[in-house]
Image: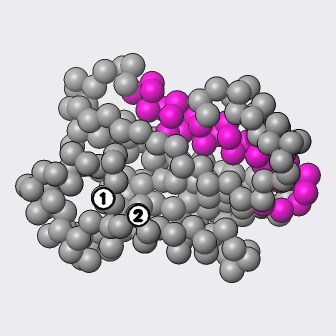
Amino acid sequence: MTDHDAARAAVDGFERDVGPLDILVNNAGMQHRAPLEDFPPEAFENLLQTNIASVFHVGQAVARHMIGRGAGKIINIASIQTALARPGIAPYTATKGAVSNLTKGMATDWAQHGLQCNAIAPGYFDTPLNAALVADPEFSAWLTKRTPAGRWGRVEELVGACVFLASDASSFVNGHTLFVDGGIAASI
């Protein structure tokens, strides 16, 4: 996913050998936590490649086929960090903000060809990426107080948003970032 030529070859091969890709969910992502003043440049570059360049590489490779068919759905996975920031993850926040803006750009360029390009921005979910935060009683207490729903999200709660954006029900939704976050982005 971080290698443009490899992503294109994989997508082209799938289209040739298996069949058309009608829906793409761009769900690659990683995290590295460190104070910004000490953030390792190699970790920053790795975040850029994994979290944003992969969305471009795979999205472009799939869109080339979808454009020819005049239809397709691209769903990029952003984050609550698209709209918010917290200490120690500024580069991650930058990449997820970029995912949301790249999604708008995809929609702007490709809607005329029948594609719907949107993003899902999960809030704080109990996943392996967040295992250290889930295990931290102080952070979990802060999160449950800060989130109107009063809890961590469950991965299965993302399914409905993805199904909506992948279905005909979203045929006039384009360039949107849908926050699935228990209300954290809406509260102060």
Write down the region rendered in magenta: 44-72
Q: Is residue 9 left or right of residue 96?
A: right
Of helix, strand and loop, which mostly describes the magenta segment? helix
Could you tell me which quadrant the N terminus lies in? top right
Nearest the viewer among 180 and 39 is 180
The residue positioned 23% from the left and 38% from the top of the image is 88
Colouring scheme applied when the structure was drawn: one colour
The image position of residue 36, as x and y in percent, is: 25, 31
The reply to whether the magenta stretch includes residue 164 is: no
The residue type indicated by label 2 comes to Val
The image position of residue 103, as x and y in percent, is: 61, 53
The image position of residue 58, as x and y in percent, is: 68, 40
Q: CA distance from mark 1 to mark 2?
A: 7 Å
Earlier in the chain: of badge 1 and badge 2, it is 1
In the picture of the structure, the residue carrying the numbered disc 1 is 126
In the picture of the structure, the residue carrying the numbered disc 2 is 155
The residue positioned 45% from the left and 60% from the top of the image is 121
Residue farthest to the right, as pictured? 68
